[in-house]
Amino acid sequence: MTSDWVTTGLSAVVILVASVVHGIAGFGFAQVSMGMMPLFRSPSSASIIFTATAVVSNARVWWSVRDAFDWEKWIVPVGGLVVGMPLGIYVFSEFNKAQMRVAIGLTLVLAVIVVGATQQLDTVTDWIEEKDYRPGNVIGVTAGLLAGILGGAVAVPGPPMIVYGAFMAASGFWSDEEMKATFTAFFGTLMLYRLGTLTYTGAVTTPLMIEALVAMPMVFVGAWVGVYIFDHIPERIFQWLVLLLLTVNAFVLLFTAVPEL
């Protein structure tokens, strides 16, 4: 029983850290949660605890920008999500513990590359603007489909939507607030959909939901701490530090899981 409470406590600390990072950098909740929790508990149980807390985290952020929400911008990628999520959950059900950790590690590497390129490198956003590319609904649906597959399989759905959002913002279709509102609405929908589907399949258990409830206050405490820190340190420096730590985290997952395959 002691080890169970230790695992629950460590999971709550990870959610706290993830929420702090998200409050400062504007990203990282999924990457930190699913990068760290599989180091001390099964990836499948970690994904369920993260999914439940992510619903609340996205709802909290969405509420702050709800006036900028446009359901038409949200519904396009959700059209792909509806198909992609069940496919991802099917893949998730076929993974063993080691395969799941490798998949999470590889997705973290992809997330670091995508976030670093689209949010940290001005040359990339300048290139997007120069190309004057106009993504259509097919691109939006495809981004939602890929995000649904990744979200269902490893609970880290960010990369496809981050690329899509970068193009939409650079093309002038979305303002910063509209992008934030669309992202949080989409990811909140994705996580709610995932939680409902996993509950239907029997993967969500009462003990795991109790652990998620224990960790839930950390979402709000972490957000408050993150906003406070954001006001006192350079944002760009912290974001690069987060990307570096996520990269290290990804390779730790890979190197510890590969020998078990």
Image (cartoon, grey):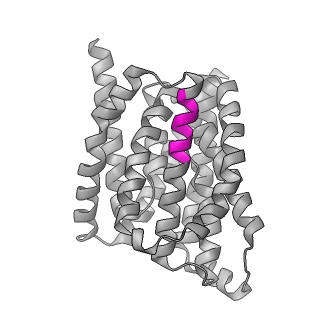
Q: Residue sitting at 31 percent across and 33 percent down? A: 213
Residue toward you, 256 or 168: 168
The answer to whether residue 258 shows anywhere in this view is: no
From the viewer's perspective, is 233 left or right of 37?
left
- In the rendered image, residue 166, in percent from the top left (x then y), is placed at 60, 72
Residue 232 visible in the shown view: yes
**Quadrant where the C terminus lies?**
top right
Look at the image and tell me in which quarter the N terminus lies.
top left
* Residue 220, horizontal then vertical, whole percent: 27, 51
* Residue under the point 65% across and 31% down: 92
Q: Nearer the viewer, residue 79 or 129?
A: 79
Q: Quadrant of residue 229?
A: bottom left
Q: Is residue 16 above or below residue 4?
A: below
Q: Residue at x 52, y 53 (%)?
A: 187
Q: Position of residue 117 (x, y in %)?
A: 59, 68
Image side of residue 186 versus residue 236, left or right: right
The answer to which quarter of the image holds residue 233 is bottom left
Furthest toward the right, the residue is 138
Residue 103 relative to residue 221: left or right? right
Between residues 116 and 204, which one lies in front from this camera angle? 204
Majority SS type along the magenta span? helix
Q: Which residues are magenta?
A: 190-199
Q: Residue 246, percent across and down?
A: 48, 50
Q: Residue at image x 39%, y 69%?
A: 65
Image quarter of residue 75: bottom right
